[in-house]
Amino acid sequence: MGAKAAGRDTGDGRTRRPRRPSAAFLAAGRRSARVTLAAGAGFYLFLYGLGQPVAATYALFAAVALAGLSHIPGTGRQRAAVLLRLVPVAWLLVAAGTFLAVRTWSAVAGMLVIGFALAFVAVAGPRPAGAAPGLQLLYILPSFPPYAPDQTGERLIGATVGILLLILAEAFVLPEPAPVPYRELTARAAAVAERCTDELTSAPYVLSPSTARAAGNAAEALRPSRVPEAERPAGPGVRSRGLAHAGLAARTLLNRLVRLPALPPGRAPTEPGLALLRAVGRSTAGSASLLWGSPPAGPDVTPATERAALAAAPTRAALPVALHRRADLLDLADAASALTRAAGLAVRGRERASGLPLGRFWYAHMRAPRLWWRRLVGHAGSRSVFFQNAVRISLALAAARAVAGLDTLPHGFWAMLATLSLTRTTLVATRKSTRQAVTGTLIGALFTAGVFALVGTDTTVYAVVLLPVLLVTFTVGPVKGVGWAQALFAITVALVFAQLAPATWRLAEARVLDVVIGSVIGAVFGLLAWPRGAQEEVRRSAAVLLRSAAETVIMTSSAVAAGGVRAPGAPPPGALLRHSLVLAESAFAQYQSEPMSPPSATSRPGSPSGSPPGQPDWQAVLLAGHHTLWGAERVLEPEPEPEPRGAAAAVTVPPLEPAAAVALTRLGERVAGRMLLLSAALDALGYAPWPETPVGRPGPGTTEVEPAPTGTGYHTADAWLHSLLADLERLAGAAPAPACEGAGPEAAGGPADT
């Protein structure tokens, strides 16, 4: 009896448990409760309490815009903090929309400029991107007739009260559990790295399986795809970039520790690299403490002394395997040093910028306005998906406003709202959303017409059912899709306007007409402006990325072979590559959210990283780009210790012996050649299937001749170039990515930005 009471008997002796609501429904329900409380309270307060229909309208739509149409990531308190900062922006948008509504042409021009600016602000991170649609709506609402500047005060009061009620609801109604902050995840990764160094410096001088698994898990936890959007350090400021850099360095360090070659038997007690590993352990412990908020009492620990001693040790008689291990240790120490310095920037900001090298920590010496400017300028071009999206939506909204103004559509606001909510980044997605939206709106309009015919002008009924309908609309719509959302929203707006003025079934007719016009405009501009979205751009940007990487490989390998002196303040290597990475990463991030085109008959199976059939492993492309950038900065510009008061020192790179120089140059040319061949294959991807075998793989009988033992610089560059060869093999589908490695912004030793 007790077992059967908890579920339903299936007839075969088993008990079927009742289905619980999905996590998506629960999250949507909590969000809907907050929207309903804020929108309903403001609407009823002004309409029935104070008799101000204009303020009531703006109170309701302000709450709906910034919580129903916007998707600001984070917990309730985090969203409340974002909304509080957006209040002055809302005032500006409402006032601008009110005064620009004087003429159709001024409203259209304002929509073009303001629409672009609000959409383009997505480059600043997920929170501004999530708030942008709601802010667009706050400008759209007052930009329609009547031109009533005398109502500006009522509109501002209503919008302000609606946003403040939403802030209170977000902060105190049904709070969600807070996720683990990125800073905490980075601190945990640094602590795991310290645990790894403890095992590697004591018998038997290898990592235990449990520690290796812990290192892999800590590295995976820092992958941006595993981190909630609100916790990702995506802003352009020094602290945000420093935290992102610290996470990247922690992942790199864990990967190097897991893959560090084992010591030869009998070498452990006298192995000079053990001192460096112990220094790495002390450095990572200090980084973890700093990120946890309890910095060590003494100065920051970096493995600089041990690294210098190991690099200066005699190497003429050393075996190649020992030299390779030494290069791996120096690489590992470099990642630990980068982690320490980036953690300092993340916690203390620009006050820790003094003395940091201008290459890897280029952002540390810049003030916030300049960093913002670089971020915006870097994406101000047709090759940026952020720029493409901003152009597409601003043109569509301006066209919708022009049609609504010239044809005097009844409730033309709904046409623009349909354009805003239904325009997607690809034509395929826009067409699908339009079909579903028109169907849903038609169903909702028919239902609304029936309700108006039965109820008439009795506003009491509409006032009673508005809150339950609001609750259902924002619970079911986000989960069930565009069709359900448009059907329910058609009913919601009809109930709202029926309380503001007498309404008949023709209100439902106007709603259908406006949605059809708005969705058609969105589809037209989806066809005219980059109809394939990021699916085309990710291919183009990946090809450019590989060409930039090839150029960086040639320049770096030649410079290492020839040696020379690098003057302080000289431009860092790979500046073009860094910018190419920014564009490729943003294109790939959007590409992952778009519906894929159906595979062709000649397509090969999906790549090891899960890319769709017939497509390259885009993550492997980004991984190769990041490894190229990180390695070029590492081998060409060995990081000097900061001088007092931030003085920069020149860096001397000793030339290689002739045999080693020739071998390294040839290896660099081979790596660059493969990159160029793969880039050409990406350029032709729209006309020929992606090759099933790696392009440029050496033929049978090809061997690589190891030159005579030489200095550590050769083996450091040699290890870097061979890791790039492994990346290119992975790109062609020959091998999966290592467990601790990643791709995209999380895969290398520093944040790539313009």
Image: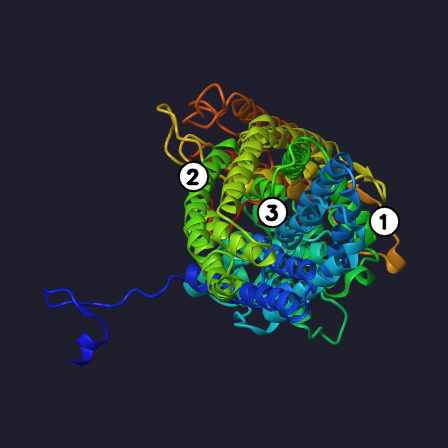
The quarter holding residue 689 reads top left
Q: Is residue 576 left or right of residue 428?
A: right
Q: Nearer the viewer, mark 3 or mark 2?
A: 3
Which residue was labeled with disc 2? 735
The image position of residue 63, as x and y in percent, is 62, 60
**How many numbered marks are there?**
3
Q: Which quarter of the rendering shows the C terminus?
A: top right
Vertical side of 627 occupied by 47: above or below: below
Could you tell me if residue 201 is visible in this image? no
Q: Nearer the viewer, mark 1 or mark 2?
A: 2
* Amino acid on which the number 2 mark rests in the picture: Ala
The image position of residue 183, as x and y in percent, is 63, 64
Q: Is residue 640 left or right of residue 540?
A: right
Vertical side of 318 occupied by 522: above or below: above
Q: SS at mark 2?
A: loop
Residue drawn at (88%, 53%), measured in percent from left and top? 647
For marks 3 and 2 on the same chain, the one whose residue lies earlier in the sequence: 2
Q: Which quarter of the rendering shows the N terminus?
A: bottom left
* Amino acid on which the number 3 mark rests in the picture: Pro
The circle on residue 235 is: none
Could you tell me how far apart the alpha carbons at marks 3 and 2 are, in whole angstroms? 21 Å
Could you tell me how far apart the alpha carbons at marks 1 and 3 are, in whole angstroms? 30 Å
